[in-house]
Amino acid sequence: DAGVIQSPRHEVTEMGQEVTLRCKPISGHDYLFWYRQTMMRGLELLIYFNNNVPIDDSGMPEDRFSAKMPNASFSTLKIQPSEPRDSAVYFCASSPSGSRGTQYFGPGTRLLVL
Amino acid sequence: GENVEQHPSTLSVQEGDSAVIKCTYSDSASNYFPWYKQELGKRPQLIIDIRSNVGEKKDQRIAVTLNKTAKHFSLHITETQPEDSAVYFCAASYDKIIFGKGTRLHILP
Protein backbone atom coordinates (compact mmCIF):
# COMPACT_ATOMS: atom_id res chain seq x y z
CA ASP A 1 0.00 0.00 0.00
CA ALA A 2 1.29 3.46 -0.87
CA GLY A 3 0.13 4.96 2.40
CA VAL A 4 -1.80 8.20 2.72
CA ILE A 5 -1.23 10.43 -0.28
CA GLN A 6 -1.47 14.21 -0.14
CA SER A 7 -1.17 16.82 -2.84
CA PRO A 8 0.28 19.25 -3.42
CA ARG A 9 3.32 18.81 -1.19
CA HIS A 10 4.05 22.52 -1.26
CA GLU A 11 1.78 25.45 -2.06
CA VAL A 12 2.65 29.12 -2.22
CA THR A 13 -0.22 31.49 -2.84
CA GLU A 14 -1.22 35.07 -2.33
CA MET A 15 -3.62 36.32 0.26
CA GLY A 16 -7.21 36.12 -0.94
CA GLN A 17 -6.67 33.18 -3.25
CA GLU A 18 -8.50 29.87 -2.90
CA VAL A 19 -6.41 26.91 -1.79
CA THR A 20 -7.45 23.27 -2.17
CA LEU A 21 -5.57 20.48 -0.44
CA ARG A 22 -6.18 16.89 -1.41
CA CYS A 23 -5.91 13.56 0.38
CA LYS A 24 -6.24 9.92 -0.54
CA PRO A 25 -6.52 7.69 2.53
CA ILE A 26 -5.27 4.14 2.86
CA SER A 27 -7.73 1.77 1.22
CA GLY A 28 -10.06 0.19 3.76
CA HIS A 29 -9.61 2.87 6.41
CA ASP A 30 -13.00 4.22 7.46
CA TYR A 31 -11.71 7.30 9.26
CA LEU A 32 -10.01 10.36 7.80
CA PHE A 33 -8.58 13.26 9.77
CA TRP A 34 -7.33 16.71 8.77
CA TYR A 35 -4.74 18.42 11.00
CA ARG A 36 -2.92 21.73 10.94
CA GLN A 37 0.56 22.04 12.43
CA THR A 38 2.26 25.29 13.40
CA MET A 39 5.08 26.08 15.81
CA MET A 40 2.79 28.17 18.00
CA ARG A 41 -0.27 25.90 18.18
CA GLY A 42 1.22 22.48 17.62
CA LEU A 43 -0.85 19.75 15.96
CA GLU A 44 -4.52 20.70 15.81
CA LEU A 45 -7.35 18.46 14.69
CA LEU A 46 -9.51 20.38 12.22
CA ILE A 47 -12.14 17.82 11.23
CA TYR A 48 -12.61 14.10 10.91
CA PHE A 49 -14.83 11.83 8.84
CA ASN A 50 -16.21 8.35 9.41
CA ASN A 51 -17.43 6.53 6.31
CA ASN A 52 -17.30 9.82 4.38
CA VAL A 53 -19.52 11.63 6.90
CA PRO A 54 -18.10 14.58 8.88
CA ILE A 55 -18.25 13.67 12.57
CA ASP A 56 -16.56 16.56 14.33
CA ASP A 57 -15.65 19.84 12.68
CA SER A 58 -15.28 21.84 15.88
CA GLY A 59 -11.61 22.40 15.12
CA MET A 60 -12.25 24.19 11.83
CA PRO A 61 -11.04 27.72 12.54
CA GLU A 62 -13.71 29.67 10.70
CA ASP A 63 -16.04 29.71 7.74
CA ARG A 64 -13.17 30.22 5.34
CA PHE A 65 -12.29 26.55 5.88
CA SER A 66 -14.35 23.71 4.45
CA ALA A 67 -13.75 20.00 3.99
CA LYS A 68 -15.46 17.35 1.92
CA MET A 69 -15.20 13.63 1.43
CA PRO A 70 -17.21 12.72 -1.67
CA ASN A 71 -16.11 9.08 -1.57
CA ALA A 72 -14.01 6.67 0.47
CA SER A 73 -10.82 7.38 -1.44
CA PHE A 74 -10.73 11.16 -1.63
CA SER A 75 -11.04 14.21 0.58
CA THR A 76 -10.39 17.92 0.13
CA LEU A 77 -9.69 20.77 2.51
CA LYS A 78 -10.43 24.17 1.04
CA ILE A 79 -9.48 27.62 2.29
CA GLN A 80 -11.28 30.52 0.66
CA PRO A 81 -10.11 33.24 0.91
CA SER A 82 -6.67 32.38 2.24
CA GLU A 83 -4.84 34.60 4.73
CA PRO A 84 -1.17 34.73 5.83
CA ARG A 85 -2.09 33.25 9.24
CA ASP A 86 -3.23 30.09 7.44
CA SER A 87 0.42 29.33 6.63
CA ALA A 88 1.14 25.93 8.18
CA VAL A 89 1.71 22.28 7.39
CA TYR A 90 -1.59 20.48 6.79
CA PHE A 91 -1.63 16.75 7.46
CA CYS A 92 -4.21 14.22 6.44
CA ALA A 93 -4.35 10.94 8.37
CA SER A 94 -6.43 7.81 8.04
CA SER A 95 -7.29 5.06 10.48
CA PRO A 96 -9.17 1.78 10.49
CA SER A 97 -10.34 2.39 14.05
CA GLY A 98 -10.93 6.08 14.51
CA SER A 99 -9.69 8.25 17.34
CA ARG A 100 -8.89 5.23 19.50
CA GLY A 101 -6.44 3.57 17.20
CA THR A 102 -3.32 4.14 15.15
CA GLN A 103 -3.50 7.02 12.72
CA TYR A 104 -1.40 6.92 9.58
CA PHE A 105 -0.29 10.35 8.50
CA GLY A 106 0.34 11.55 5.01
CA PRO A 107 3.49 13.51 4.13
CA GLY A 108 1.72 16.84 4.63
CA THR A 109 1.17 19.93 2.51
CA ARG A 110 3.34 22.91 3.40
CA LEU A 111 1.23 26.02 2.73
CA LEU A 112 2.62 29.52 2.56
CA VAL A 113 0.21 32.41 2.09
CA LEU A 114 1.93 35.65 1.17
CA GLY B 1 -12.65 22.23 26.75
CA GLU B 2 -10.49 19.14 26.72
CA ASN B 3 -6.77 19.73 27.02
CA VAL B 4 -3.48 17.83 27.02
CA GLU B 5 -0.47 19.42 28.68
CA GLN B 6 2.98 18.11 27.75
CA HIS B 7 6.30 18.76 29.51
CA PRO B 8 9.03 19.62 28.93
CA SER B 9 8.85 21.46 25.63
CA THR B 10 12.55 20.80 25.03
CA LEU B 11 14.74 18.08 26.49
CA SER B 12 18.45 17.41 25.98
CA VAL B 13 19.99 14.19 27.22
CA GLN B 14 23.38 12.57 26.83
CA GLU B 15 23.49 9.61 24.49
CA GLY B 16 22.94 6.47 26.51
CA ASP B 17 20.97 8.21 29.24
CA SER B 18 17.20 7.99 29.73
CA ALA B 19 14.58 10.52 28.66
CA VAL B 20 11.17 11.03 30.26
CA ILE B 21 8.31 13.08 28.81
CA LYS B 22 5.17 13.71 30.84
CA CYS B 23 1.60 14.52 29.88
CA THR B 24 -1.58 15.31 31.74
CA TYR B 25 -5.09 15.31 30.33
CA SER B 26 -8.35 16.87 31.42
CA ASP B 27 -11.07 14.61 29.99
CA SER B 28 -11.58 11.75 32.44
CA ALA B 29 -13.40 9.81 29.70
CA SER B 30 -10.18 9.47 27.69
CA ASN B 31 -9.23 5.83 27.28
CA TYR B 32 -6.59 5.74 24.57
CA PHE B 33 -3.16 7.36 24.84
CA PRO B 34 -0.83 7.21 21.83
CA TRP B 35 2.65 8.65 21.42
CA TYR B 36 3.86 9.88 18.05
CA LYS B 37 7.39 10.66 16.92
CA GLN B 38 8.04 13.29 14.27
CA GLU B 39 11.48 13.62 12.75
CA LEU B 40 12.46 16.91 11.15
CA GLY B 41 10.46 17.52 7.99
CA LYS B 42 8.66 14.19 8.25
CA ARG B 43 5.19 13.04 9.22
CA PRO B 44 4.20 11.95 12.76
CA GLN B 45 4.40 8.19 13.29
CA LEU B 46 3.00 6.12 16.12
CA ILE B 47 5.69 4.63 18.34
CA ILE B 48 3.66 3.23 21.23
CA ASP B 49 0.18 3.47 22.70
CA ILE B 50 -1.64 2.42 25.85
CA ARG B 51 -5.27 1.89 26.74
CA SER B 52 -6.91 2.75 30.02
CA ASN B 53 -7.17 -0.83 31.22
CA VAL B 54 -3.37 -1.11 31.36
CA GLY B 55 -0.95 0.72 33.66
CA GLU B 56 2.27 0.15 31.75
CA LYS B 57 3.43 -1.04 28.35
CA LYS B 58 6.92 -1.65 27.07
CA ASP B 59 8.43 -2.09 23.63
CA GLN B 60 12.21 -2.57 23.64
CA ARG B 61 13.72 0.76 24.79
CA ILE B 62 10.39 2.56 24.96
CA ALA B 63 7.83 2.34 27.76
CA VAL B 64 4.68 4.22 28.62
CA THR B 65 3.01 4.46 32.02
CA LEU B 66 -0.52 5.59 32.78
CA ASN B 67 -2.04 6.83 36.02
CA LYS B 68 -5.77 7.23 35.35
CA THR B 69 -6.52 8.52 38.82
CA ALA B 70 -4.10 11.40 38.45
CA LYS B 71 -4.74 11.71 34.69
CA HIS B 72 -1.01 11.47 33.99
CA PHE B 73 0.89 9.42 31.44
CA SER B 74 4.57 9.36 30.58
CA LEU B 75 6.96 8.17 27.88
CA HIS B 76 10.27 6.66 28.93
CA ILE B 77 13.12 6.09 26.50
CA THR B 78 16.13 4.20 27.85
CA GLU B 79 19.65 3.95 26.39
CA THR B 80 18.97 6.88 24.10
CA GLN B 81 20.56 6.91 20.66
CA PRO B 82 21.12 9.70 18.10
CA GLU B 83 18.17 8.49 16.04
CA ASP B 84 15.88 9.21 18.98
CA SER B 85 16.31 12.94 18.30
CA ALA B 86 12.86 14.15 17.18
CA VAL B 87 9.70 15.84 18.39
CA TYR B 88 7.45 13.58 20.46
CA PHE B 89 3.71 14.17 20.81
CA CYS B 90 1.43 12.63 23.39
CA ALA B 91 -2.31 12.45 22.84
CA ALA B 92 -5.45 11.50 24.72
CA SER B 93 -8.60 10.28 23.08
CA TYR B 94 -12.13 9.19 23.67
CA ASP B 95 -14.34 10.33 20.81
CA LYS B 96 -11.92 13.03 19.80
CA ILE B 97 -8.14 12.97 19.91
CA ILE B 98 -6.28 15.87 21.50
CA PHE B 99 -2.53 16.22 21.04
CA GLY B 100 -0.01 17.80 23.37
CA LYS B 101 2.19 20.61 22.05
CA GLY B 102 5.19 18.32 21.63
CA THR B 103 8.63 17.81 23.18
CA ARG B 104 11.74 18.39 21.14
CA LEU B 105 14.26 15.76 22.25
CA HIS B 106 17.96 16.32 21.53
CA ILE B 107 20.38 13.46 22.04
CA LEU B 108 23.83 14.87 22.78
CA PRO B 109 26.93 12.94 21.62
Image: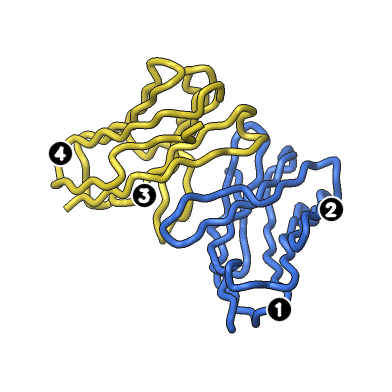
Chain colours: A yellow, B blue
Q: Is residue B46 above or below residue B101?
A: above
Query: Viewer-nearest of labels 4 and 2?
Result: 2
Horizontal side, residue B31 vs residue A77: left or right: right
Residue identified by numbered label 2: B56
Give the residue type at disc 3.
Val
Horizontal side, residue A107 vs residue B7: left or right: left
Horizontal side, residue A38 vs residue A95: left or right: left
Residue identified by numbered label 1: B16
Q: Is residue B71 above or below residue B17?
A: above
Q: CA distance from mark 1 to mark 4?
A: 50 Å
Horizontal side, residue B97 vs residue A19: left or right: right
Q: CA distance from mark 3 to mark 2?
A: 33 Å
Residue identified by numbered label 3: A89
Q: CA distance from mark 2 to mark 1?
A: 22 Å
Q: Residues within 10 Å of mark 4 (few under 14, many from 20)?
A: some
Residue identified by numbered label 4: A17
Give the residue type at disc 2.
Glu
Give the residue type at disc 4.
Gln
Q: Determine the secondary structure under disc 2.
A: strand
Q: Locate residue A67, reporting x and y percent.
A: 36, 27
Q: Nearer the viewer, residue B69 or A113?
A: A113
Asked whether residue A58 is in view, the answer is no
Asked whether residue B39 is in view, the answer is yes
Q: Nearer the viewer, residue A91 or A81?
A: A91
